[in-house]
């Protein structure tokens, strides 16, 4: 039986990447050591981390005046690092589009010297849309505007990045980095947990414009962008194996034709599923059409017991991790870059069969 992994994260990785990692696991480039055993100060790992950065820069078109950092702590630590490094004694602006935005807002509010203002929210409709943001809503004296470009739980995503004037936009891009056509130059900071489209859990990528480094004094060196940048992500031992896997994923992405090519494939996969939902008399998408995510697609029957039955039968048929987040319920298909199109085709066939057997028109 074929297993399809629809997990929102840690998520599916490209099979060729896993096979290459397997082949090199015990002996990396004739060193007699596993990648997991390499010193982060060794020439072999130095080449790995430099190649990873160069590939990411190429894939995302990262301008020269941005630093790329490979850190730890997940996106959740960035919820605190961003205000700590940029907004002490200043105002920070946030858009609330769900649980991850809420966590970022809560972390910023923990700093008493920071004035946190939520300028827009879609909580009024259970976060089923992206609220409109116009430049006149943005205080030009603010330290930054924070957005979450894609919400894994509710399946909404920014189709266009708002205009913020001179205020830098900070983006949690964990779940749709390398799966969109955003331009890095439109952001001051991009950060992303790796476990969706980059590699295994444990690595966090931060892309930060150089003029935003060193703005505020930070007492804890591990949380200081300046120290991390000055040490080229090697202030302490980085997540070496996760960086190695990320490098392999970046190589795989380049072989696929880069971000533009993978985005086209992601759009094809998402369109298949959204079209099937539109035609169905049983399954529906709860998300407003103009805010729908390409990477995380929730759907429901409208009957909690029927959702439960579908999830159980889907799991038995090899569709892993389709159950929706506990805060939303229903089902959720996470279609990251490495997820195969055939998995979407097979899921749709299963949905159609289930619909016929369970009262669909």
Image (cartoon, rainbow, N blue to C red):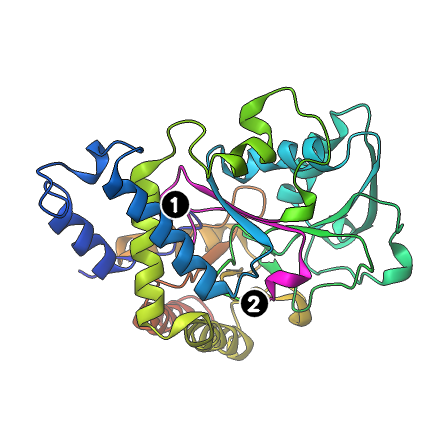
Residue 197, located in which quarter of the rendered image?
bottom left
- Kindly identify the residue that appears in the image at 54 percent across and 67 percent down: 180
Which of the two residues, 167 or 192, is positioned nearer the viewer here? 167
Residue 12 appearing in the image? no
Q: Position of residue 272 (x, y in %)?
A: 45, 77
The image position of residue 223, as x and y in percent, is 58, 28
Judged left or right of residue 336, residue 319 is left
Residue furthest to the top in view is 219
Give the residues in magenta. Answer: 181-209
Viewer-nearest of discs 2 and 1: 1
Judge whether 129 appears above or below 240 on screen: below
Taking depth in this image into account, of 74 and 52 the one nearest to the observer is 52
Q: Is residue 177 left or right of residue 27?
A: right
Q: Residues within 10 Å of mark 2 (few under 14, many from 20)?
A: some
Q: Residues within 10 Å of mark 1 (few under 14, many from 20)?
A: some
Residue 182 magenta: yes
Disc assigned to residue 186: none
Image: 313 above or below 340: above
Q: Residue at x 60, y 21 (%)?
A: 220
Secondary structure beneath label 1: loop
Magenta stretch holds residue 246: no
Q: Residue at x 77, y 35 (%)?
A: 87
User: Marks 2 and 1, how far apart in space?
Assistant: 26 Å
Residue 1: give x, y in percent of width and height: 17, 60
The residue shown at (31%, 33%) is: 40
Contact, CB < 8 Å: mark 2 with mark 1? no
- Kindly identify which residue carries mark 2: 284
Q: Which mark is residue 10?
A: 1
| Nearer-the-camera pick, 153 or 73 | 73
Tell me if residue 141 can be seen. yes
């Amino acid at each position: 039986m074929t297993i399809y992994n629809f997990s929102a994260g840690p998520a599916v990785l490209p099979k060729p990447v896993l096979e290459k990692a397997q082949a090199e696991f015990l002996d990396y480039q004739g060193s007699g050591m596993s990648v997991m055993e390499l010193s982060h100060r060794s020439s072999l790992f130095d080449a790995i981390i430099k190649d990873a950065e160069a590939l990411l820069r190429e894939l995302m078109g990262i301008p020269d005046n941005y630093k790329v950092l490979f850190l730890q702590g997940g996106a959740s630590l960035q919820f605190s690092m961003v205000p700590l490094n940029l907004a002490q004694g200043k105002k920070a602006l946030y858009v609330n589009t769900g649980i991850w935005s809420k966590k970022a807002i809560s972390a910023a509010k923990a700093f008493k010297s920071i004035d946190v203002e939520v300028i827009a929210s879609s909580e009024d409709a259970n976060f089923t849309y992206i609220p409109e943001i116009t430049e006149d809503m943005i205080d030009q004296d603010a330290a930054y505007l924070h957005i979450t470009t894609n919400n894994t739980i509710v399946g909404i995503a920014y189709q266009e990045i708002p205009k913020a004037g001179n205020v830098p936009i900070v983006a949690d891009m964990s779940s749709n980095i390398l799966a969109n056509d955003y331009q890095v130059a439109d952001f001051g900071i991009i950060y992303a947990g790796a476990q969706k489209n980059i590699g295994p859990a444990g690595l966090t990528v931060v892309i930060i414009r150089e003029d935003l480094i060193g703005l505020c004094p930070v007492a804890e060196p591990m949380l200081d962008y300046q120290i991390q940048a000055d040490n080229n992500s090697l202030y302490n031992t980085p997540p070496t194996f996760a960086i190695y896997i990320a490098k392999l994923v970046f190589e795989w992405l380049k072989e696929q034709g880069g971000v533009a090519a993978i985005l086209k494939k992601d759009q094809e996969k998402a369109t298949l599923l959204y079209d099937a939902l539109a035609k169905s008399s049983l399954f529906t998408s709860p998300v407003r059409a103009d805010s729908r995510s390409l990477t995380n697609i929730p759907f429901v029957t409208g009957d909690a017991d029927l959702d439960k039955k579908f999830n159980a039968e889907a799991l038995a048929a090899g569709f892993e991790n389709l159950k929706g987040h506990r805060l939303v319920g229903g089902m959720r298909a996470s279609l990251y870059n490495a997820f195969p199109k055939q998995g979407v085709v097979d899921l749709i066939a299963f949905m159609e069969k289930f619909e016929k057997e369970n009262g669909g028109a």
